[in-house]
Amino acid sequence: MIVQILRRLLTMAVTLLIISALVFFVIKLPPGDYLTNRIMELRATGEAGSIAKAELLIRQYGLDRPVWEQYLIWVGLMPGPAGFSGLLQGDWGWSFEYDKPVADVVGDALWLTLLVNVTAVIFVHLVAIPAAIYSATHRHTVGDAVVTVLGYVGLAVPGFLLALIMLFYANRWFGLSIGGLYDASLTNRPWDGEKIRSLAAHLIVPTLVIGLGGTAAMIRRMRANLLDELAKPYTVTARAKGMAPTRALLKYPFRMSLNPFVADIGNLLPHLVSGSVLVSLVLSLPTVGPQLLESLRNQDQFMAGFILMFVAALTLVGMLISDLALVWLDPRIRMGLR
């Protein structure tokens, strides 16, 4: 097992290197970049001091070199004007739009993004699994019909539309402002008990909005998988031999129906991150989604490149976790690794 994990880690490193090349060269495809566009604007206004600073940044980050050299410097595989200083060395680059290091711009946004989306994943599983079990074991009942209708509604309603509806009625009925992840008055305040309590209260709405679509999809898929497992001969045999209904359900059919969802863990987190950009904009969430959109729009290459690499790394780590969970969950996969 240790050999398999080490092999996967090596594969992940190679995959990240390939993804980094694709990300960098795709970002560089449009002509120009933030600094060159900015210099053209400054020359039109005659701001010599700002032009000199922009040209200094171009030389400092090697943006006057060929594209392949810029990539190697960005990753940290080639020395730049400041020596080896790239992603491998922990230097995430400079955000030209914010005029500060990328690490300072995305500092809180990274862990808040993880917090929001991990909370949404937990919500999805806590709600979808019991609902799917109930729906599969109570076919053609009123409860099954209610779960099915709610599932279709969750799949049909876009997250950003639900966010707008909740914003409107929360303000109209209760006079509440539910945007953001904490009260606006606490924005520049250090993390203390009051700010953490505010964060916990503000997490409820984003969790519901972001998790609703995933919950609905998981209920429909798990219900179908569980119905398929319950109709198989081994389940019928277990019941015929007098096994308790709960044990006959949870020991084998439920475990086997979980396999597709455990395998999807690797895709679920990055999907929530990328799929919640509009929700984050509507709810004014300080996550990396809106920052990615803005950096791509303004050709802020180091900022956009780092966020895309963060999502890629999140995908690979999630896939590793899902594979390890599958090995633990399904003995057939464990036997196949021997």
Image (spheres, rainbow, N blue to C red):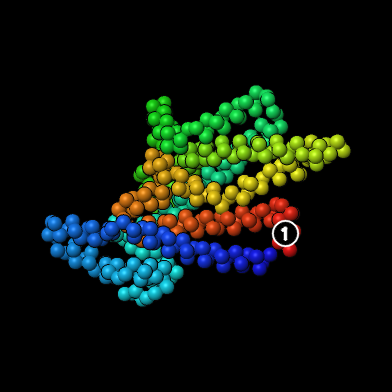
Q: Is residue 235 left or right of residue 59?
A: right
Residue at the image point whose x is 52% and y is 33% from the top: 154
Looking at the picture, tell me which residue is in the foreground, 66 or 202.
66
In the displayed structure, 174 sits above or below 307; it is above
Q: Extreme top residue here?
A: 142
Q: Extreme left residue here?
A: 46
Percent position of residue 246, x then y: 77, 37
Residue at the image point whose x is 48% and y is 38% from the top: 209
In the displayed structure, 206 sits above or below 171; it is below
Alpha-carbon neighbours of circle 1 within 10 Å: few (<14), some, or many (≥20)? few
In the displayed structure, 109 sits above or below 76; it is above
Quarter-of-image position of residue 30: bottom left
Residue at the image point whose x is 23% and y is 57% from the top: 37
Residue at the image point whose x is 53% and y is 44% from the top: 120
Looking at the picture, tell me which residue is in the foreground, 283 or 149.
149
Would residue 40 be visible to someone looking at this image? yes
**Residue labelled with disc 1:** 336
Question: In which quadrant of the rendered image does the N terminus lie?
Answer: bottom right
Question: In which quadrant of the rendered image does the C terminus lie?
Answer: bottom right
Percent position of residue 252, x then y: 75, 44
User: What amino acid is found at the position of numbered circle 1 in the picture?
Assistant: Gly
Percent position of residue 10, x then y: 56, 67
Quarter-of-image position of residue 182: top left
Looking at the picture, tell me which residue is in the foreground, 107 or 136.
136
